[in-house]
Amino acid sequence: MSAADHLFKLRSYMATLGVDAYVVTSSDPHLSEYLADHWKFRNWLSGFTGSAGTLVVTQEEAGLWTDSRYFLQAEQQLDDSGIELFRMGEKDTPAYEEWLNLQLYPGCVVGINGKTITVNAYRTLAKTLKKADIRLDGKLFLEDEIWEGRPLIPEEGIFELSADYCGMERSDKIELIRDIMKSKGATHYVIAALDEIAWILNFRGKDVSYNPVFHSYLIITENQINLFIDPHKLTSSIGKQLAKEGIKVYLYDDFYEFIKDMLQDSIILIDPDRVNSSIFSYLPSQSAKIEIESLITQLKARKNPVEIENFRKAMIKDGVAMVNFLYWLDNAIGKESLNEYTLTKKLRSFRKKQANYQGDSFSTISGYGANGAIVHYSVNKESALEVKPEGFYLIDSGGQYLEGTTDLTRTIALGALSEDEKKDFTLVLKGHIALDKAIFPKGTRGVHLDILARQALWSAGLNYGHGTGHGVGHFLNVHEGPQSIRPQDNGVEIKEGMITSNEPGLYRTGKYGIRIENLILCENDQKTEFGEFLKFETLTLCPIDLRAIKVDLLTSEEKEWLNNYHQKVRLALEKHLEEDEKQWLVKSTERV
């Protein structure tokens, strides 16, 4: 069935319920970025497979709102679907809430699955619609009714991550959280975010592609831990260990009934941006609610010394795999038949050779030529372009290791480049270096640093539409908060121990894309009479393509940074390489 057929089916069912519009988000009940197939309702309805986007369907119209990362992808996938693309962030693009108010009339009903929208987002949507006398109904789970052949929730087992990797025992994390709960006056803490539960319990799973998490809910009280999970996921030894530690296991499907029956005098702590609105609606109305940022978000974001040391080990492994790949590519290009898809498989084969490799950390972006300009390009076997010994090839990839999560992007010159191509590459590199070299006072937020990565591009009248940096989990989600580096201010300081990406880019539609990404660790720099200052350390170990650089555009300080970085890469990786690969690395990291 086509997207048009799916929309017809949805509209027919909406009509029987008296629903005038239906909103489909890109989330699951845990508000995850990446979803198990069971919750990819928006994908099924629209045919759009990007990780971010909201579909809104009325009886006459349909629109999909997504950001600049997915504009080109959405154009292609929504073609002939009857769904209009709304480009978020562009001047004349209305928010979908405003669009609904224009499409509907007083007395209309808008439906949404309340399990797929945050408490705060639901409140905002309801408030906006109410201005036009439109009612929001968050109890309409229409996917249950119209999605034939819906995939089941995964039943993969979980496994324990030793404190040798994560640095803290489960009991210590729980005690720390309880101490903070007590200071806030909370008796119960309701947690639905999968990466937070995995982090607290030191368990990892395989329910979601690329993210080592498992479907569950967790409630921490003053004297009890309640875990809601499919018992098939637990081995007998894990089950016995949980019982020994006083962690009580309930069925995953019993969670909503459980919270509905919580004691009326409970003081419940939730994060309204990390808990779905249905959870909030099920909580006892008489219970006091404390709405604050998740206690786990900050704890998880600031890596402890053991996690940091393991990240360094993961970077060596990933750097070796990348050098294996880049060396092979240099020798294969123009001699073998290559395409964007086969290159992703080849890189994965090199990562698989590394000990403790657990899979990729996201779907590899493998874009040759014009496809490199599609920021989150999704390659498949059928549509993959042939890769030739000319122009730019962009590969954005990462691995999951027991030691940590990696994410890096390299733009590779596959043949001779024009002066304009080299200039573009060098301007991106200058921004990357400027951010990496930043020294800044404590209290600095990502929005304050973002300009450093863009200044060289701005000076040439150029820019990129995505953020510059996101947080990265420790053998967890490749995208995690709370920090980010982007033009929008989220109010979050960059703190010691946070690991963030540094990935400026430049995209010329129909021609090529350029992005250079490393992961950087925030650490202390110095303390003076003017305060405490922080800096970044680059963790990623992989050469930056010297063939793409217009060296005369680099300052002496920038050349020094590049030479020092390449020396660090060479010293860290060469002892793990075969002789021919080592010689390739020496040449690829020579001084400029």
Image (cartoon, rainbow, N blue to C red):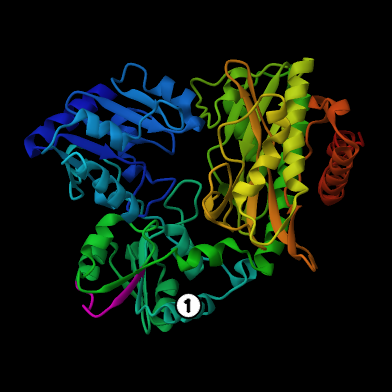
| x then y, percent, for residue 74 | 42, 25
Image: 121 above or below 192: above
Is 380 in front, or is 553? 553
Residue under the image location 71 percent in, 43 percent down = 321
Left or right: 182 as drawn, with respect to 146? right
Q: Amino acid at mark 1?
A: Ile
Residue at (75, 17) in percent of width and height: 420
Percent x, y for residue 557? Answer: 88, 41
Q: Nearer the viewer, residue 237 or 48?
A: 48
Image coordinates of residue 65 in percent, x first then y, are: 37, 32
Q: Quadrant of residue 583?
A: top right
The residue where tag 1 is placed is: 180
Q: Main secondary structure of the magenta part?
A: loop
State the quadrant of the N terminus. Answer: top left
- Give the answer, above or below, for where 469 lies relative to 232: above
Magenta run includes residue 510:
no
Q: Nearer the viewer, residue 252 or 342?
A: 252
Residue 560 location, x and y as percent?
Answer: 89, 42
Residue under the image location 15 percent in, 41 percent down: 133
Q: Is residue 346 visible?
A: no
Q: Look at the numbered disc 1 and give the secondary structure of its residue.
A: helix
**Callout 1: 10 Å neighbours few (<14), some, many (20+)?**
few
Q: Quadrant of the C terminus?
A: top right
Residue interval drawn in magenta:
261-269
Q: Is residue 208 above or below residue 422?
A: below
The quarter of the picture where residue 279 lies is: bottom left
Image quadrant assignment for residue 64: top left
Magenta run includes residue 264: yes
Up-down relation of residue 367 to residue 323 (above or below): above
- Which residue is at a point 58% across and 70% down the rendered structure image? 162
